[in-house]
Amino acid sequence: MAMPHGETPPYRGDEHPDGEIKCAGLDGRRLRYEHVAPTTRTPAFLPYLIPILLVDLLSPIRMGLRARILLLLFLVSVGARDIPNNVQEFYDSVVAQGSCKRPLQTGFYDMVDSDDNSFAYCGDHVDDYGIIYLQGGNGKLANMDTDCDGDRSKNDDGRCDDAHSVQSVTAMRDYVSAYESGVSDLNPFVHDYVVFGNTGDKDGWITFDPRDYGMKPLSVMAVVCNNRLIYGIWGDTNGDDGVNPRVGEASISLATLCFGADFDLSGDVGQGILYIGFTGGDAVPGDNANWAAADEEEFQSSIKSIGDKLIQRIGGTTNTSSF
């Protein structure tokens, strides 16, 4: 939902980039996902343990203990992971608080057919943790709609074919193309990106630019979804081509990491996704990100180390004045 067709992307070369489930149905061109919170959390290594044991048993050459451990650590190191304690505690505290005390901008919806415009870009911890996150009223967090914008020339599996008003470019096209990676724009099937910020020229349309509070284009973000922690990059913005200014959206690759590839297109829309943006230039992976990655797992792996560092801010403090 970057912008109407033909509109100039709102985030162009005014900064160099180095300065910086359940599916519940279709909402226009956006697939909407439901967060289902199970009562217990499965350790991240368990999904990988069974295949490792099977390979070990069936292989004519048995793996030693060290080989098993190294393989397990490698598999767990990519993709979705358990939520670290500090992030889980923060998630719980946000829900328990009920609403944002220091909203940077209010008046947003997370669904096209909703009358709840209580969602805000929250700045409660922009000074101490260096983060901006989405929060609604009465303990609500946003849903996850799926963005199919960008260059779909690779890995397009057809899941976006029925989506409407898909844009051929993202708002961050000029930034990613400035890197010497040969990538001209973000690919929604490869790059795990979050739609963050709202633009538009319609009368009365509510907008928000995260750059005003220190976020940088293509910076790493954290998404808590489906009892998992996923990293993404700030890769697109919500435009004014819809009926209301909305929040809570990510690329189809990020949604796949959260909920898997088999989307159930029936059911009710749920809430519960926490989107966290990080301020400062140290949140920008730059050339360290694998922009030419083969798929979403490979790209996720390339931004994991910086994401792991950034989430250490949560529950601590950061001196944003030095960024």
Image (cartoon, rainbow, N blue to C red):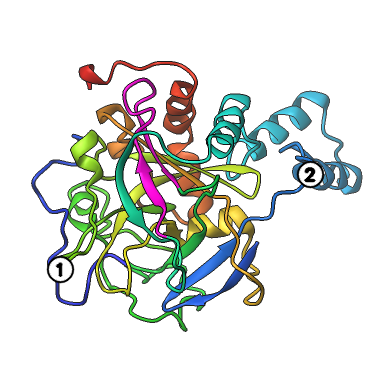
Residue bounds of the magenta highlight: 117-135
Choose top left, top right, bottom left or bottom right for residue 310. top left
Q: Earlier in the sequence, mark 1 or mark 2?
A: 2
Residue at the (82%, 33%) spot, across then down: 63
Label 2 crowd bin: few (<14), some (14–19), many (20+), radius 10 Å: few
Query: Dot 2 corresponds to which residue?
Result: 39
Q: Quadrant of the C terminus?
A: top left
Residue at the (22%, 17%) spot, across then down: 322
Q: Is residue 63 above or below residue 26?
A: above
Q: Is residue 252 visible?
A: no
Q: Is residue 127 above or below residue 208?
A: above
What residue type is disc 1 on? Answer: Asp
Q: Is residue 18 above or below residue 35?
A: above
Which of the two residues, 216 or 90, is positioned nearer the viewer here?
90
Q: Is residue 146 visible?
A: yes
With 186 as the anchor, is 270 left or right in this view?
A: right
With 9 as the anchor, is 319 left or right in this view?
A: right
